[in-house]
Amino acid sequence: MKDIALVETPPRDLDLDARYVFQFSVRSRSGRTSRYRYRVWPEGRPGELLCDLVAEGRPGESSRGSVLLIALRADVTIGNLSAEPL
């Protein structure tokens, strides 16, 4: 099964010495699969959206899930995480 993005911005390079905000969200929808969203912008400048990806879940997916943050071959700091209802 191929996943299809409903909204997708083209890939962009991030500056190594800059800070960014990454936002992930999942919205449950009655009788339908969940809608997932991923957004990235420079810290303090939410109007300069660098990435906006929206996709729907797969049929039969679980109604509960989790988030996994991975940094592969990178020197990153992950902090100030919060999980809030939409």
Image (spheres, rainbow, N blue to C red):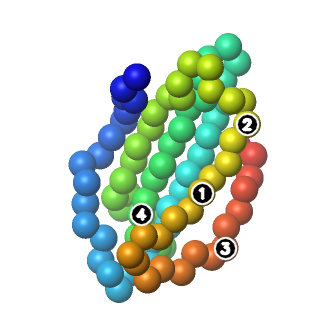
Residues at marks 2 and 4 touching, judged by CB atoms closer than 8 Å: no
Is 85 or 47 nearer to us in this picture? 85
On the image, which quarter does residue 40 sit in?
Answer: bottom left
Q: Earlier in the sequence, mark 4 or mark 3?
A: 4
- As shown in the figure, which amino acid type bears the numbered disc 1? Leu
The answer to whether residue 59 is above or below residue 46 is above
Count of numbered marks: 4
Q: Earlier in the sequence, mark 2 or mark 4?
A: 4
**For mark 2, what is the residue?**
64
**For mark 4, what is the residue?**
41
**Residue 14 spot, x, y in % from top left:** 30, 70
**For mark 3, what is the residue?**
80
**Residue 34 spot, x, y in % from top left:** 60, 29
Q: Secondary structure at mark 2?
A: loop
Q: Nearer the viewer, mark 4 or mark 1?
A: 1
- As shown in the figure, which amino acid type bears the numbered disc 3? Asn
- As shown in the figure, which amino acid type bears the numbered disc 4? Trp
Q: Earlier in the sequence, mark 4 or mark 1?
A: 4
- Split into 4 quadrants, where in the image is the C terminus? top right
The residue sitting at 75% across, 46% down in the picture is: 85
Mark pair 4, 1: CA separation: 20 Å
The answer to whether residue 72 is seen in the rendering is yes
The answer to whether residue 64 is above or below residue 12 is above
Looking at the rendered structure, which numbered label has been put on residue 68?
1
**Residue 4 spot, x, y in % from top left:** 37, 28
